Amino acid sequence: MELWIDNRQAIHPVDEALMEEVERAVKMALQMEKNSLDYEVSVSFVTNEEIHGLNRDYRGVDRPTDVLSFPLDDEDEVFGEMDILLGDIVIAMEIAKEQAEEFGHSLMREVVYLTVHSMFHLMGYDHETDEEKQVMRGREKAVLKELGVFK
């Protein structure tokens, strides 16, 4: 598994512990869903302003959001081995912090949840209908439980 982390904001620190938890979340989602780690994922931490622009430009929604997922599902031959580029996750750290405070848990826990949520979008899940939402939430909860986030 290749994980690329890009911190493009200076509002909330992205330390080694946070990056390690994000990596654990990505790995666990891949292992539980794909039974493989042969994927490449990028995670970017951004400002509200940046995610607002991305949300407007790519989804037609003119407001900031907590997380965006950009699935790639592209197979690329690299050094004779197949790397599957799963996609990009973009997390607004300001909104993540606000949500963590609102729900009464840590920023770390919120970022882990947003990472897992976005991983399932990258793997083809959605929550447009009640049935889709129920399936996706069930998969998220299983990963979060395995990570020790939910008991």
Image (cartoon, rainbow, N blue to C red):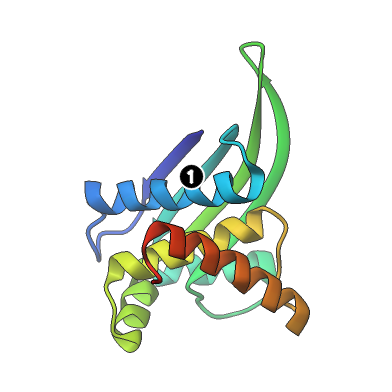
Give the residue pinned by disc 1: 27
The quadrant where residue 37 appears:
top right
Nearer to us in this view, 45 or 3: 3
Q: Is residue 51 above or below residue 86?
A: below
Nearer to us in this view, 95 or 36: 36
Classify mark 1: helix, strand or loop: helix
Q: Could you say where residue 51 lies in the image, as x and y percent from the top left?
A: 49, 67
The quadrant where residue 59 appears:
bottom right
Please state if 147 lies on the left or on the right of 73 as rendered: left
Name the image quarter holding the C terminus. Answer: bottom left
Nearer to us in this view, 151 or 122: 151
> Which residue occupies the extreme top position in the image?
80
Q: Is residue 46 above or below residue 41?
A: below
Q: Could you say where residue 141 lies in the image, as x and y percent from the top left?
A: 52, 69
Amino acid at circle 1: Lys
Please state if 65 lies on the left or on the right of 135 as rendered: left
Identify the residue at horizontal 51%, vertical 75% (top origin). Answer: 65
Identify the residue at horizontal 71%, vertical 63% (top origin). Answer: 125
Please state if 145 lies on the left or on the right of 10 as rendered: right
Identify the residue at horizontal 44%, vertical 53% (top origin). Answer: 25
Q: Could you say where residue 30 lies in the image, as x and y percent from the top left?
A: 57, 46
Q: Is residue 42 visible?
A: yes
